[in-house]
Amino acid sequence: MAIITITIIEGRDTEVKNRLIAGITDVCVKELKAKPEQVRVVIHEVAKGNYAVAGKPV
């Protein structure tokens, strides 16, 4: 089984996240020779202000 965790900045709509999940699943099926049922994709959304770039809050 593959468990893929993706961290993105919040604000993308459900359709975009669904396409991302489908695409990542397809890659895992192809490259890992896994069945789609064996692939888990977890999306963590980070709120603006809860991360920093080069030591400065964004």
Image (tube, rainbow, N blue to C red):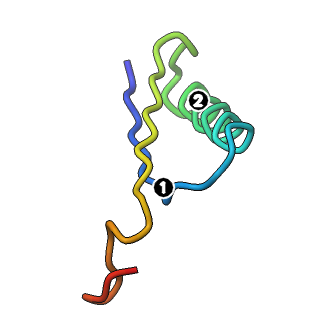
The image quadrant that residue 54 belongs to is bottom left
Foreground residue among 51 and 32: 51
Q: Alpha-carbon neighbours of circle 2 within 10 Å: few (<14), some, or many (≥20)? A: many
Whole-percent x, y for residue 33 in the image? 53, 22
Q: CA distance from mark 2 to mark 1?
A: 17 Å
Whole-percent x, y for residue 15 in the image? 74, 38
Can you say whether 6 is above or below 49 in the image? above
Determine whether, in the image, residue 17 is placed left or right of residue 7.
right
Q: Quadrant of the C terminus?
A: bottom left
Foreground residue among 23 and 54: 54
Residue lying at 58% horizontally and 38% vertically, measured from the top left: 24
Reading the image, the residue beneath label 2 is 25
Residue lying at 66% horizontally and 31% vertically, measured from the top left: 22
Q: Quadrant of the N terminus?
A: top left
Whole-percent x, y for residue 42 in the image? 43, 33
Residue lying at 53% horizontally and 10% vertically, measured from the top left: 37
Determine whether, in the image, residue 44 is placed left or right of residue 14.
left
Reading the image, the residue beneath label 1 is 8
Q: Alpha-carbon neighbours of circle 1 within 10 Å: few (<14), some, or many (≥20)? A: few
